[in-house]
Image: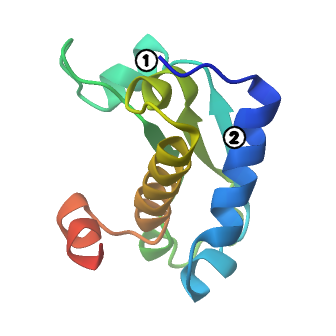
Amino acid sequence: MLEISDEHFQTLIDKALTELPGEHVKNIKNVAILYEIDPTLQQREVSHLRNDQTLLGLYEGVPLTERQGMSRVLPDKITLFKNPLLHMVQTEQQLLQEIKHTLWHEIGHYYGLNHTQIRALE
């Protein structure tokens, strides 16, 4: 497994964000993007994962499509999971690509897209 420091992992997240194309990324508001080492049991349960499945990222919040009439909304959160992402790759360049892909996927959820719609856009 590739090993990198937490600081360098954060640097790759920041780089991935600047490299993602389009207005959709630039128009994200009130969203914290952070990372954790591994998903919690509760995050795995909410995602309905089996024991043989992994979680690379998670969007938690109220998608834009569901905010009609809501004037106060807590910040949304996109979490990337370091160890599962590291297990997917062999090189730092592959890691950057996986981070970008995972961020794009979770940003899609922020905009209210489901998995099928996100895959179609990819």
**What is the distance, in whole Å, between disc 1 and disc 2 at their CAs?**
17 Å
User: Is residue 37 placed above or below 48 in the rendered structure?
Assistant: above
Residue at x 23%, y 66% (from the top left corner): 119
Q: Name the residue furthest bottom.
A: 23
Q: Along the horizontal axis of the image, is 56 left or right of 22? A: left
- According to the image, label 1 marks what residue? 42
For disc 2, the neighbor class at 10 Å (few under 14, some 14 to 19, many from 20) is some
Amino acid carrying label 2: it is Leu
Q: Residue 48 occupies which quadrant of the picture?
A: top left
Q: Residue 87's x, y, as percent? A: 41, 23
Q: Earlier in the sequence, mark 1 or mark 2?
A: 2
- According to the image, label 2 marks what residue? 34
User: Is residue 106 placed above or below 34 in the rendered structure?
Assistant: below
For disc 1, the neighbor class at 10 Å (few under 14, some 14 to 19, many from 20) is few
Q: Of circles 1 and 2, which is in front? A: 2
Q: Residue 96's x, y, as percent? A: 56, 49
Amino acid carrying label 1: it is Gln
Q: Nearer the viewer, residue 18 or 31?
A: 18
